[in-house]
Image (cartoon, grey):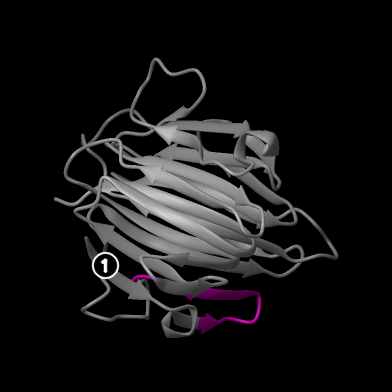
Amino acid sequence: MITKVHKADTRGYVNHGWLKAKHSFSFASYYDESRIHFGTLRVLNDDIVEPAMGFGTHPHDNMEIVTIPLLGALEHKDFMGHIEVLTPGEIQIMSAGSGLRHSEYNHSESEPVNLLQIWVLPKEKDIEPRYNQRVFDDEGKKNKFQTLVSPDKENNDTMWINQNAYFSLAKIDSGKEINYSVNSKGNGVYVFIIEGDVTIDGQSFERRDGIGIEDAEMISINAVKESYVLAIEVPMN
């Protein structure tokens, strides 16, 4: 097992007033040559957007973009005609493909919104842009990993991503141990502790810590206290 640890307080930070963001990997004005990416995982941003503020209409291309809301409500609009509001329990995925334009705003006039914005490099370039949003029941995450995003177009239980990648979430009770089994040989797994306190490979990880793991078929996660954990499995080349 090969590991790379990113403690929460080592992330890049920016405060634009309307936006406070922590970057696990180099992004915008934050640059660290040792933290460009983890395999095809390119961006993991922890964003807090103030009420009624947001990201104006802007373009993307050739990127798989996954958004996980943690608090509040996020309003999405795009050139394909989607006007949606995303809240905790839902997951959004976009294949930017040959190019799209969209905006993301805090839907609330009074409460902040906190979201994880995650970018994965695509398997195929210049595909037709695509949008999907879905609710996932918390019961499916109880003391086990629930796969939300996968490369399997025929799997009705997951949303499709244009990459051999998997996104899974687990809510783990205090004192419980669960395992993550790697789906594809050669993939690595980036484990991000959204909330809680866990041990992985004998190391302690707390809220917003991350660890990239390579050359492992199974990863054991022990919850020291109630924890909410994201596993992002991606090709390493």
Q: Is residue 145 shown in magenta?
A: no
Q: Quadrant of residue 64?
A: top left
Query: How many C-alpha atoms fall within 10 Å of the one at disc 1: few (<14), some, or many (≥20)?
Result: some
Q: Which residue is mark 1?
A: 3
Q: Residue at x 63, y 69 (%)?
A: 48
Query: Which image quarter holds the N terminus?
Result: bottom left
Residue 236 in percent (x, y) is at 18, 52
Outermost residue on the top side: it is: 154
Position above or below: 130 against 10:
above
Residue 216 in percent (x, y) is at 24, 51
Outermost residue on the left side: it is: 237
On screen, residue 14 versus residue 224, left or right, reads: left
Q: Residue at x 51, y 41 (%)?
A: 145
The magenta segment is 14-26
Q: Nearer the viewer, residue 152 or 212?
A: 212
Q: Nearer the viewer, residue 38 or 230?
A: 230
Q: Nearer the viewer, residue 23 or 175?
A: 175
Q: Residue at x 18, y 39 (%)?
A: 185
Q: Quadrant of residue 229?
A: bottom right
